[in-house]
Amino acid sequence: MKKKNWIIVILLELALLVGAVCMTAFPVINRTYTADELTQICGEVHDDGIYVDQNIHWADNFALTPALKLNYGSYKITVRYNTDGYNNLLMLSYPNVMNSIEPMNGQLYSNSCRLPVDRNEVSMEAYVKSGREDYLACVYFMGEGSLTVESITVRKTAGGVLRAGLTVILLSVIVNLLIVFFDKRKQNKIKQESIQTFFMLSGIIIFTSIPLMFDYILQGHDLIFHLLRIEGIKEGLSSGDFPIKIQSNWLSGNGYATSVFYGDIFLYIPALLRLCGFNITESYNIYIFLNNVATCLISYYCFKIMSGKRNAAVIGSALYTASMYRIIDIYIRSSVGEYSAITFLPLIACGLWKVFTEDTNSEDYSKNWIMPVIGYSGIINTHILTCEMAGAFTILLCLVMIKKIFNKKTFVVLVKIVIYTVILNLGFLLPFLHYMKLGGFIVTNGSRFTSGIQQYGAFLGQLFEPFTTYDGLSVNTEMGIADEMPSTTGLGLVVCAVAIIYVLVSGYVKDKKQKHTGMIALAFAALSLWFSSNLFPWDKLQNMNSLFEKLISMISLPWRFLSIATVMLAVCGIIALINMNEKRKEYKYFMGAMIFACVIQGSVLMSDIMNHYEPYRVYGEQELDTTTVIGAEYLPYGSVVETFMAQYVQPGDNIEYTQNYRHNNYIECSIKNNGSVESNVKFSIVYYAGYTAVDKQTGEKLEVYNDGGRLALKVKPGYSGDVVVRFTGFVFWKISAVVSMLAFVVLIICITGKEKVILKVLANKKN
């Protein structure tokens, strides 16, 4: 397209962007309605607000704003109140919905917000999709105790503006890419083969994303836990924290160290979407879609390198992306960390394949450290257990290839992989290892080690199950598999194992490197399937010594090894296909069986999930139970979740305490010790090393300590001052984060091949 036409297109897109931003930004709304301005349905108006109690015998909305004219956008509704009753609610609605005359019909996305007794101010998010003039922010009294409403504030946030702007930018990018595509197509610069590949990969992505095509989430086993992780990052970013280590939204705002123990770098994507005006449901579904895209493209890229053939790579990508275990992970288990880690396993497989098979004298061999580093970094920052399993198989591979390891150039590349992986991930690894060394957590205490994990292994029949149920948990073998969660890689990948055995036995594999690759992949697949089953002697190994006990207990569920089996079986499939003559019948039979089994099994399972799971619509954090810590592994040892279900302070003897401000685990307070002996103040905040209490005027640090899992501080006799309590972490944590960021920049430079140019420029400057 001509330059003049491009200018016109870009100007039109800019005009559309400005128009969308202006339409969503205006009118500006930020209005506080005091008790006198609120509509009072029942109760009495006192000096401090509208009052109602259980003696009135009323359980419905009792305080409403005047009718609100709200246009498209995101809004924050805040209520100031005092209550000693439970289950009172704040919500945004409109009369026809409140009177059950009509449903929301997508006009408003908002959940109600509970008013906790330990707070006097809460906020909720609301997303208006269709403008109306009769929206109402209202408080519901549920008939218990008393409730006083002081004010309700309605404020339009920047979220709707950012969302509209991002949407226009995305559409503009798509339009521009289509223009470029058709322009290049006219000039015959795009091959038909490339177009076919694009549509086939797009089909894989769409197929695995069908369960996302709803306005709700499919609520899997661990969904709430991972949504809280996303919300924790969003909350940290909005408070100006980075990198985030203690997520302050957990446990009623008392904080939880999820980001120290559980890598979450990729969850910054949905967290940023939340900050840009997307609700929780949209942000999470977009993340899954992006993960499907990444898994499909990464696996295709890796399998194309390993096979050298487009068709084999596409089939391998389809089998891997739509594998049963991955679909189970996404839509049944909602195991965000594990299915995110699965995305990177092909990079490790392909990277190590290049290290051990390519000519060490080739020009680019020295760069073979890059792909494994990206792969290992991906799983370190998503799922430590997958990292543990991948690490074990990597060591096993090195033992198998021991002769090649002693080749100088190969050894140097392997050393680079280890060193650069550590440096690149230092920002996560150092805090993680620091806390693991300090101990004192439930996760580090030996008494919690899971014993007898063998009983949770899969039966052989489960591993080769033709059709699977949509629901269930992992149960022990004594209970059989009735109503148990599926545990299989899928028959499509089983066909891959049959295919590689067939070509090896038939003598079709002439290339020595491909033969070794196929045999190792098949052996590792068989080994990981054995590990996944109840036939592997996990219990005997676990009882051998304390080290084995600790390592094996971390696995907890043997069928986790199905992730390793999945990538190994996909490698078997592509090696088998490239060693068959595409014109022979067996090639068509095997390829057809792989795709047919994969599509049919996947379709049946996803259809079952979609037709049986209850819709789960969640838009703001107010709907999430912040005490959903599953096993509470990251709490101080000896503490219980119930300790942190509310925000409170317990001043010691002779202590005058005034709380000036509190936002979750950040507190500004005034403390005075009127006694002649040392006293203390105990907070509901979960104790972690790295918290500080500092006098605002003098900068003096008050000693903090662990009191049964709670944060407490010592107050010397006669002390009086204003104190700030917050988590500051450690200087070496921040240094490690900077090192990781710099290492990431260097990695990008190495990937783009610009390192020599930069080094040359630096050398010239020195001269």
Image: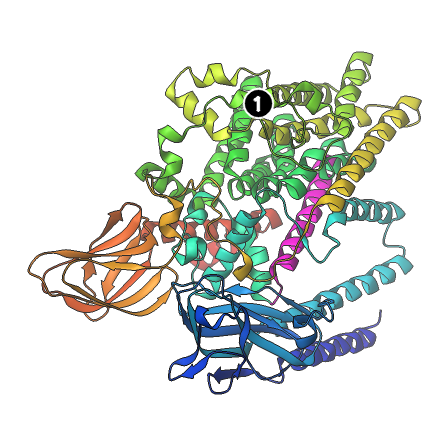
Residue 283 painted magenta: yes
Task: Give me the residue at 36% from left, 29% from top.
Answer: 446
Residue matched to label 1: 397
Q: Residue 727 appears at what percent x and percent y?
A: 34, 57
Q: Secondary structure at mark 1?
A: helix
Magenta stretch, main secondary structure class: helix
Q: How is the image coloured?
A: rainbow
Q: Is residue 251 left or right of residue 63?
A: left
Name the quarter where the N terminus is drawn: bottom right
- For the question of whether residue 157 can be seen, the reply is no
Give, as a single range, the part of the protein colored magenta.
Answer: 277-303
User: Does residue 443 appear left or right of residue 597 in this picture?
Assistant: left
Residue depicted at 50% across the width and 83% down the height? 33
Q: Look at the image and say whether residue 300 sits in the magenta stretch.
A: yes
Tell me the quarter of the picture where residue 366 sits: top right
Q: Is residue 260 left or right of residue 64?
A: left
- The kind of residue on which mark 1 rests is Leu
Quadrant (top left/top right/bottom left/bottom right) for the C terminus: bottom left
The reply to whether residue 524 is in sight is yes
Picture coordinates of residue 705 (x, y %)? 24, 49
Task: Give the x, y percent position of residue 214.
Answer: 74, 55
- Most distant residue in the left direction: 676
Residue 427, position as x, y percentages in the image: 43, 48
Task: Classify residue 652 as left or right of residue 438.
Answer: left
Q: Nearer the viewer, residue 364 or 3?
A: 3
Seen in the picture, residue 238 relative to 507 is either above or below; the reply is: below
Q: Residue at x 72, y 67 (%)?
A: 103
Q: Is residue 85 above or below residue 394?
A: below
Q: Is residue 411 above or below residue 763?
A: above
662 or 354: nearer the eye? 662
